[in-house]
Image (cartoon, coloured by chain):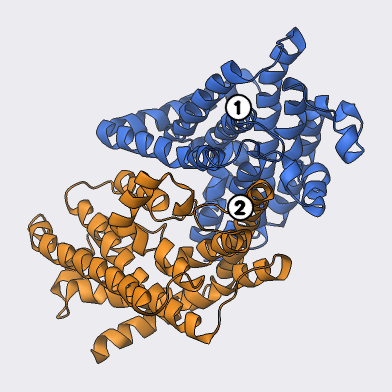
Chain colours: A orange, B blue
């Protein structure tokens, strides 16, 4: 366990060295947050509520999605693992006396830990300065951070599965892009699921992607209390566990594809 | 100087890129399809929003779809032809930009052709389909002027996007770490232009009209095509802004090339 904590700590430090890039990225997230916020303002000029969301919820929602992109890792399907499969360095990773999935989960959590603050706070703060956002009390903050942590693990579980595709097809960019599109649409990232017609909305709730964006944001907005909140967190944990287990099940088949050449 | 010989070189370079893309046919097809899907998400958002409201900032669904389609086609043309300059930062970091400089050909031209990516036309198909559907659906009286304005909008829009792309990529001559700042302006700019700028607050509208001329990509010329109220009534701008996109595009090019040249002159290699 100490080893994995150390791996996570190193990953945190690795990402924290790119200051200018982080700043530029946070700026981009903020810009997109503002554009979406103005769309929401226009929508709520004619509507009072959409699927249970009010203007303040929707505005908070769009800035939170921008704040969560890098922490949850929505755009990084494939990522390091896929890259190392392509270059062949994966052979070294497989020889390491650590759990393969556990090692990469630790790296991902270190990355997420850095991004939750560095890429998360700027868009949220900028949004809160210009718009009226719903900022929760200490309890909701704590519940949200727990929910966000599980969301990150679930997202990692999914991205790990996508990365394993690289063991069969060398060019992972197609699958990675398609995965990003699916996650963006079904997670509530591009638009709150509250905007969807009911049948689609319920279908989305049955898919794992809802645990990555929509549910943590609902927790932040204080839409779940008491037993209901516990149920949401348990549902997220369930999907995280299922996705991680699926990755473990596929991994041995994937590594059978590996051929190491000497020299 | 652009002479016949230079054009032939460009054609060979682009041909080589296209052939290399086609070399892995299944992989290319997969990426083309997934590019279509991912760029289509922006339009999905617009469609979903319009299931809840009848008008956005006073615009109908078909009108916003026209704006989306025209901007999308213009953007994908710019992205296909000039989007490769994004790799400037990578090349400077790796030191391979020096290799570009010693060749007897424009650095910008080399970057654009070397990273020419045919798969990016996925967005062209997707936005083109939306544009065609919107042209059929918008309730306007078609006149020769309006019909001619559609290709003019797209051509001028592509040039403006391209100019913004070159200008922001040139940031890499000063710092290689802030590449993503450019994305905020290029991809963010495309995202902005998909909506009527009336939904934005005054400072943002002014920025789009006068500083980064994104309002001239879609909004102003679309007012004419869609037969909507002249900008004078909303912004205090003369009606001529509806027809100014080509002029603005030329000016944007001049500014972008000036920034590029200043950056290029400033470039001192990495020393590694």
Label 1: how many Cα within 10 Å (few below 14, some 14–19, many 20+): many
Q: Is mark 1 on a helix, strand or loop?
A: helix
Q: Where is residue A75 in the image (x, y as percent from the top left)?
A: 42, 57
Lateral position of residue B173 relative to residue B272, left or right: right
Q: Is residue A79 above or below residue B239?
A: below
Q: In this view, does A218 lie above or below A12?
A: above
Mark seen at residue B62: 1
Identify the residue at horizontal 86%, vertical 38% (top origin): B234
The numbered mark 2 sits on a residue in which chain? A
Q: Position of residue B148 (x, y in %)?
A: 71, 13
Identify the residue at horizontal 12%, vertical 59% (top origin): A250
Residue under label 2: A36
The numbered mark 1 sits on a residue in which chain? B
Q: What element carries label 2?
A: helix
Res B253 quadrant in image: top right
Residue A174 visible in this rendered orientation of the protein: yes
Residue B269 visible in this rendered orientation of the protein: no
* Screen quadrant of the N terminus of chain A: bottom left
* Mark in the foreground, 2 or 1: 1
| A119 or A63, nearer to the observer | A63
Q: Where is residue B205 in the image (x, y as percent from the top left)?
A: 79, 47
* Screen quadrant of the C terminus of chain A: bottom left
């Amino acid at each position: 366990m100490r080893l994995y904590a150390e791996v996570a700590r190193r990953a945190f430090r690795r990402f924290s060295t790119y200051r200018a890039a982080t700043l530029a990225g946070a700026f981009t997230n903020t810009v997109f947050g503002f554009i979406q916020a103005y769309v929401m303002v226009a929508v709520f000029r004619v509507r009072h509520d959409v699927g249970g969301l009010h203007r303040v919820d929707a505005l908070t929602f769009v800035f939170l999605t921008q704040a969560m992109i890098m922490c949850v890792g929505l755009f990084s399907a494939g990522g390091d693992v896929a890259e190392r499969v392509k270059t062949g360095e994966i052979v070294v990773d497989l020889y390491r006396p650590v759990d393969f999935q556990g090692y990469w989960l630790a790296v991902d959590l270190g990355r997420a830990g850095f991004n939750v603050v560095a890429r998360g706070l700027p868009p949220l703060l900028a949004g809160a300065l210009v718009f009226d956002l719903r900022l929760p009390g200490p309890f909701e903050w704590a519940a949200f951070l727990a929910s966000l942590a599980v969301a990150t693990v679930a997202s990692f579980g999914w991205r790990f599965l996508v990365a394993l595709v690289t063991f069969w097809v060398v060019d992972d960019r197609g699958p990675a892009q398609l995965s990003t599109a699916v996650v963006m649409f079904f997670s509530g990232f591009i638009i709150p699921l509250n905007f969807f017609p009911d049948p689609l909305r319920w279908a989305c709730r049955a898919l794992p992607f809802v645990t990555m964006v929509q549910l943590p944001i609902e927790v932040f907005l204080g839409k779940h209390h008491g037993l209901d909140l516990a149920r949401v967190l348990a549902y997220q944990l369930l999907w995280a566990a299922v996705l991680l287990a699926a990755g473990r099940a596929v991994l041995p088949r994937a590594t059978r594809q590996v051929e190491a050449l000497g020299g | 100087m652009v002479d016949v010989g230079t054009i032939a070189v460009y054609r060979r370079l682009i041909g080589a890129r296209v052939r290399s893309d086609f070399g892995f046919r299944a992989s290319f097809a997969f990426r083309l399809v997934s590019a279509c899907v991912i760029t289509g998400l922006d339009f999905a958002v617009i469609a979903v929003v319009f299931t809840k409201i009848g008008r956005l900032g006073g615009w109908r669904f078909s009108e916003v779809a026209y704006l989306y389609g025209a901007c999308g086609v213009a953007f994908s043309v710019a992205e296909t032809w000039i989007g490769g300059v994004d790799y400037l930062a990578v090349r400077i970091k790796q030191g391979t930009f020096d290799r570009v400089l010693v060749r007897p050909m424009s650095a910008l031209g080399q970057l654009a052709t070397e990273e020419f990516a045919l798969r990016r036309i996925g967005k062209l198909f997707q936005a083109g389909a939306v544009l065609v559907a919107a042209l059929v659906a918008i309730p306007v009286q078609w006149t020769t002027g309006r019909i001619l304005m559609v290709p003019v909008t797209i051509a001028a829009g592509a040039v403006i996007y391209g100019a913004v792309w070159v200008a922001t990529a040139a940031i890499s001559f000063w710092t290689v770490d802030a590449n993503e700042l450019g994305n905020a302006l290029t991809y963010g700019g495309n995202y902005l232009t998909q909506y009527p700028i009336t939904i934005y607050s005054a400072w943002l509208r002014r920025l789009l009209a006068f500083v980064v001329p994104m309002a001239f990509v879609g909004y102003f010329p679309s007012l004419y095509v869609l037969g909507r109220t002249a900008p004078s009534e909303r912004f205090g701008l003369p009606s001529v802004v509806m027809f100014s996109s080509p002029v603005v595009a030329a000016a944007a090019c001049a500014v972008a090339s000036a920034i590029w040249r200043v950056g290029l002159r400033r470039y001192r290699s990495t020393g590694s």
